[in-house]
Amino acid sequence: MIGFTLFALFVVLMLAGVPIGAALGLGGIVAIAWANADTQWWGLLAAPQNLQAGIAKYPLLALPMFVLVGSVFDRAGVAQRMVDFAVACVGRSPGMLPLVAITVAMVLGGISGSGPANAAAVGGVMIAAMSRAGYPPAFSASVVGAAAATDILIPPSIAFIVYSVNVPGASVPALFAAGMVPGVLAGLALVLPAVWVSRRHGFGQAEAALPRPPFWRSLREASWGLAAPVLILGGMRVGWFTPTEAAAVAAAYGLLVGMLVHRTIGFGDLYEIFRDATETSAVIMIVLALAGIFAYSVSTLGIADPVVAWVTALGLGSTGTLILLFVVMTVLGMFLDGVSIFLVFLPLLYPLMLHFQWDPVWFGVLLTMKIAIGQFTPPLAVNLMVACRLANVRMEQTVPWVGWLLLSFVCAALAVLFVPELALWLPRSLGY
């Protein structure tokens, strides 16, 4: 009864418009108070203790720094330079701008770690460019929203950091390495329908008339941004710094590029950059802290055990259960971001993972892919919502186009589900 009340109160508060962090914290506090109603009052001290424990974890130090990295590189104008370089590489034939948008989103995914931020950065450049080339705004928004979904797979990923601190046996470096191949696979899967639909419907006919940027100059301008993922991932691999230190190095590198190389960031911009990054980080950390109370309630009240018993009683087996989770996580991803889903459902999913003996790294990548699908699935897709606002279109207008992209992304996710080595090969090769 207490477990039902915990989740019912959380859902009611969410529907009432209460922020997700407050809903998690209030639901957990009520459950703790109810469970200790017949004992001593100091049982409620578990709430502040777990509030602090929810964020007192070393890997979480990387989170605000990676948020700052995204803000810095967005202001530094890296996206526009990457677009110019990509166009210089692939040319101006019809269907090439969607390819450029997806490729740039994947590269920026190796810098920021946030899907909506990626959609804003890429969409701010690509949607206007695709419009000038003759692509419908709804199609452009669909491509940008889907491309940004690769962001939480390609390291560094904020979702992977949150997953690692909640699941023993899944380190941040291992998750970062495991997300690389599935992230690239998902990006390639998006390219095929985007280019095919463009050419089938004759989109981008005006592309050929637009000038092609000079290759070497574009490469020189984009090289600083292209070096950022190499610095972050390469530095961690050779042992120069930990993921937390890599985030700090990347932030310093971004400021260097923006202020001294591209000169797009002045001293007057620093306050706004740090303020935006601080506000975003504070919101995430507050939600993480309050989710600690919720997770404690789920684990100590034994709520997860009946859920595991119910799921196993369905007789679906390991593969059938994974497909069921595939559907559930995708639907949840339409309404919530990846961090929130992990915070709410990992206390329930972790015992299920142990029961079926799933590899924690592979399971984390698979869950993240499921959530990524939901981020551009109408009607409440966070990435697609950002892209639609930039394109000034209603989300329902994207349905004819986004369906093809969803189908291809689902195929990539199913490939990782049935072939776990797609996620596990790289971390094993690197010795994680």
Image (cartoon, helix red, strand yellow):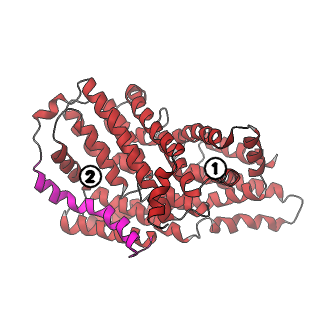
SS for callout 2 = helix
Q: Amino acid at mark 1?
A: Phe
Residue 127 visible in image: no
The circle on residue 274 is none
- Range of magenta residues: 213-242
Q: Residue at x 20, y 69 (%)?
A: 260
Q: Residue furthest right?
A: 38
Q: Indicate the secondary structure of the residue bearing disc 1.
A: helix
x and y percentages locating residue 179 in the rendered image: 45, 54
Q: Position of residue 207 (x, y in %)?
A: 16, 34
Residue 345, numbered label: 1
Farthest residue, direction top: 201
Quickly name the residue at label 2.
79
Residue at point 68% right, 65% down? 50
Identify which residue, 120 or 325, lies in the foreground.
Answer: 325
Above or below, comparing residue 230 to residue 304 in the picture: below
Q: Position of residue 130 (x, y in %)?
A: 23, 36
Q: Is residue 218 above or below residue 320?
A: below
